[in-house]
Amino acid sequence: MTGLKGKAVVAQSGGPTAVINASACGVIQTALRRRDVFTGVYGALNGILGVLQEELYDLGAEDPAQIDRLKRSPSSALGSCRHKLKDLKSSRRDYERILEVFKAHDVRYFFYIGGNDSMDTAAKLGRLAAEVDYEMIAIGVPKTIDNDLAYTDHSPGFGSVAKFNAASVMEAGRDTEALYTHDTTTVHEVMGRNAGWIAASCGLARRSDQEAPHIILLPEVPFIRERFVEKVRDCLAKYRCCFVVCGEGSKTPDGKYLGEAGGAFAKDAFGHTQLGGACDAVRAIIETDVGVKSRTNRAGTAQRAAMHFASRTDAEEAYLVGQKAVEAAMRGIGGKMVTIERTSDQPYRITTGLADLEKVANAERPLPKEYISEDGFAVTEAFRRYASPLVQGEAEIEIGADGLPVYARLARRLIGGKTGPYAVS
C-alpha cells in the first residue's frame, strides 16, 4: 500500500509508563513532518474507546512545544483505557464501527501504542479492513512495564520502572538495615502479573551480600512457604535483617496468586484477576512463622510514572520505536509491531525490526530460567548483563520555577463528529 495518503490516528492503551508519551511524540512529530503522506494526525481520547465514540482531536492543532514536551512527560497524555475488544466474530460490530469512524474521517493509518491486547486489536482491525477492501495500515508500537512482549529484546517502559524500583530497594534496604533491632524485615511489592522482569530488576540493587534485596519472589518460581521461611531465617542469621522483593504475580504451587483481591477474585476489563496485597500475605507469613516484625512497601502506580528518575536509554528508545512505526507505515508495511533487537551488550547497541501483530498478540515472554538463580530467590549475572544497559542515564526532564517537573498538557479539543453516537458494549 505504498503511496497511500490520508489521516493518521494515534492511540494509547493499558497502564501508563514513564515513556509511553515519548513513543507518541515519536509518532506525532514524524508524521507531522510528512504532510505529503499524512493529511492530518489525530489523537484518540482514551485509546480505542475514543475511536468507538468518535472522540478524536487534531494533534496538528496542539502547541508544538507541548507536543515536544511529551518526550519528557509520564503517563498517557493522549488518554488511555482498559477496554478490550474480543474476537472478530463476537465483537464484529465494534470493529465495523471503528472502520466506519475511520472512513468518515479518511483515516488510513492507525498507530496503537500498547501491549499484547493492543496488538491483538490492531491485528484484527487490519484483517477486517482487508476483508472489506478498505485501504488502511495498522502498526503496533510496543509498550509495557512488565517486559513480557515476545519478539522484542525488551519493551519501552521496562527500563524506567526497573531503574526506579532498583533505586527504591537500595534506599529502603538501607532503612531496614539501620533499624534491624526493631523492623527486622521488609517486604517490597512491585508490579508484574505473570512475568517477573520487574521483580528481577530489583536484583540490580544488590552489589554485595549484605545489601537488599536478600530474597526475590518471582511469578515464575512457585512460592513454597517452608522454603521461604527457611530462607528468611538464614538471612536473619547472616545479616540480622531481611529485605524481600515480592512480585505481585507470585503464586503458590497450585497457581493461586498470593495477592488475589476481592471476595470472588475481582476481574479487570481485560478479564485479569485484580492483584494487590501480595506483600501483606508475605508479611503475615514472616510474622507468624518466623516470629519477627515485618514492614511492607508498595510502590503502586508511582513506579510506572516516575519520570523524575526515568532511564535515558528507555526514553530514547521509546521515541525511536514511535518514529520507526511511521517510517514503516510510509513504506506500506502494516500488520506489524516495531521491535527492539539487541546487537551488542558491551557496548550496548540496538537496531529495530518488525514482528507480526498476530504473533505478538498470542505470545507472552516469562523471565527465562537462565536469569533465575538455582535456589529461585535471586537473579544471575546473565540477567544483570541483560538489564543493566536498560537503566543507564537519566532521562531529560524540565524543572519549573517551583522546583518541580513541568509536564505536557494537551488541549485535546475534539473535532466534530460525523457518524452519530455509539453505545460501547
Image (tube, grey):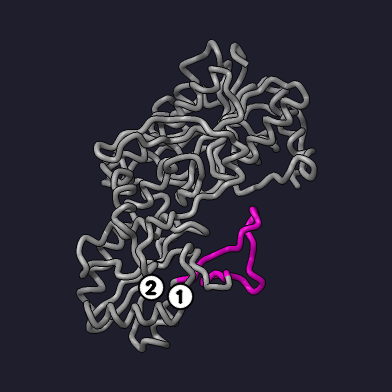
Question: From the viewer's perspective, is residue 312 above or below residue 202?
Answer: above
**Residue at x-position 35% and y-position 71%:** 244
Task: Say which quarter of the image contains residue 94.
Answer: top right
Residue 195: where, in percent of width, then height? Answer: 48, 57
Of 165 and 381, nearer the camera is 381
What amino acid is labelled 2 in the image? Thr
**Residue at x-position 38% and y-position 35%:** 317
Residue 25 at least partly seen: no
User: Which residue has dot 1 on it?
Assistant: 280
User: Which residue has dot 2 on it?
Assistant: 296
Spatial distance from mark 2 to mark 1, Cα to Cα? 7 Å
Answer yes or no: do the residues labelled 2 and 1 have beta carbons within 8 Å?
yes
| Dominant SS type (magenta) | loop
Q: Residues within 10 Å of mark 1 (few under 14, many from 20)?
A: many
Of 24 and 130, nearer the camera is 130
Q: Which residues are magenta?
A: 255-278
Question: From the viewer's perspective, is residue 138 above or below residue 217?
Answer: above
Secondary structure beneath dot 1 equals helix
Give the left or right position of residue 95, taking residue 200 as reference.
right
Residue 297: where, in percent of width, then height? Answer: 38, 68
**Residue at x-position 30% and y-position 46%:** 391
Secondary structure beneath dot 2 equals strand
Q: Is residue 423 magenta?
A: no
> In the rendered structure, which disc, 2 or 1, sits on the residue that comes first in sequence?
1
